[in-house]
Image (cartoon, rainbow, N blue to C red):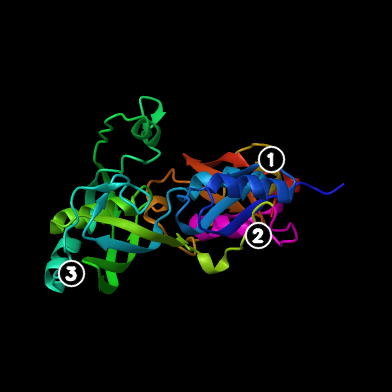
Amino acid sequence: MTSAPHGILLVDKAEDRTSHDVVARVRWLLGTKKVGHAGTLDPMATGLLVLGVGQGTRLLTHLVGLDKTYLATIRLGSATTTDDREGEPLGERVDATGIEDVRLEEALDGLRGDIQQVPSTVSAIKVDGKRAYARARAGEDVQLAARPVRVPRFEILSRTEQDGHLDLEAVVDCSSGTYVRALARDLGAALGVGGHLTALRRTAVGPFAVEDGVQVPARGEGDDVDLPLHGLGEIAARVLPVLDVSEDEAAALGTGKRIRSAQELRAPSWPHPAHAGPEDAPVAALDTAGRLVAVLQREGRDWHPRLVVPEDARR
């Protein structure tokens, strides 16, 4: 009997597929129902999806908040109802070809750093228990509150003028929860010409790059595909501080017991502000083989296991 799979899967999502379609396909290909994600992509977007499989789903809570990097194509000169190419035109088209680089840079600077962003009305944010996009499609006037996001980098790589539009190729580094569609909308508004997103590709989630992702064939495109799962210990050590534990300590943690260790913590290979804070921040306990035993939290002088990985699922 084949043992159940456990780990983290990096996927390079194709265009015109929903993230949930990819999750369902991976479930079928791996023969397990236990597959989750660390943040979706819109159907028109491509790029990196981080999936948890088996016990890997329990690690996703520590991956959801990682920063993201995107390559975006923004069209200035017209706005849409959805802030992207799939929406209906909103207002009159404006000639945006004469926008100078200096003026463009000033508008970009206002969208960098710690900002307040109003999400797109077709976002998945819940309003009174119902998704905003569902309310918008039902004809409701959806008003979403601004919320804080962080955009360390919003840089133009190239510009092309055509048919009165100014198309910008941009790279965006941003905190989790940032809507690149809203950045396109707000850039166009700041310049007084309207703007929307025409293409989007997620190239990184924290330390994970799209180049390491695999293509998942859609149903009917074939089932012969290798889906390499990254071990939980490997992934945890990249984003969480690490406590190396002995065999006896690993055995104790495996039964839910607290331990007291004099070992110094190892910093994650990819330090992240969200994991560098308080004394009770999560810590990955790795055994002598580098496998994830548990995710710990400090309580006084002890380490208390908040998540315990069963012996047969440790990787």
Pointers 3 and 1 in contact (C-beta within 8 Å): no
Between the residue at mark 2 and the residue at mark 3, the CA separation in whole angstroms equals: 56 Å
Report the magenta residues as a range. Answer: 220-248
Q: Nearer the viewer, mark 1 or mark 2?
A: 1
| Residue 308 in the figure: left or right of residue 117 | right
Q: Secondary structure at mark 1?
A: loop
Pointers 1 and 2 in contact (C-beta within 8 Å): no
Within-10-Å neighbours for mark 3: few <14, some 14–19, many 20+? some
Earlier residue among tags 2 and 3: 3
- The answer to whether residue 75 is visible is yes
Name the residue tied to disc 3. Answer: 97
Residue 181 in the image, given as x and y percentages of width and height: 32, 52
> Residue drawn 19% across and 48% down?
91
Up the image or down, 74 lies above or below 119; here it is below
Name the residue tied to disc 2. Answer: 290
| Residue 262 in the figure: left or right of residue 145 | right
Pointers 2 and 3 in contact (C-beta within 8 Å): no
Up the image or down, 209 lies above or below 27; here it is below
Residue 32 in the image, given as x and y percentages of width and height: 72, 43
Point out the residue furthest to the top here.
128
Amino acid type, residue under disc 1 in the picture: Lys
> Residue drawn 49% across and 42% down?
298
Q: Residue 108 appears in which quarter of the rendering?
A: bottom left
Within-10-Å neighbours for mark 1: few <14, some 14–19, many 20+? few
Earlier residue among tags 1 and 2: 1
Up the image or down, 12 lies above or below 3; here it is below
Amino acid type, residue under disc 3 in the picture: Thr
Amino acid type, residue under disc 2 in the picture: Gly
Name the residue tied to disc 1. Answer: 33
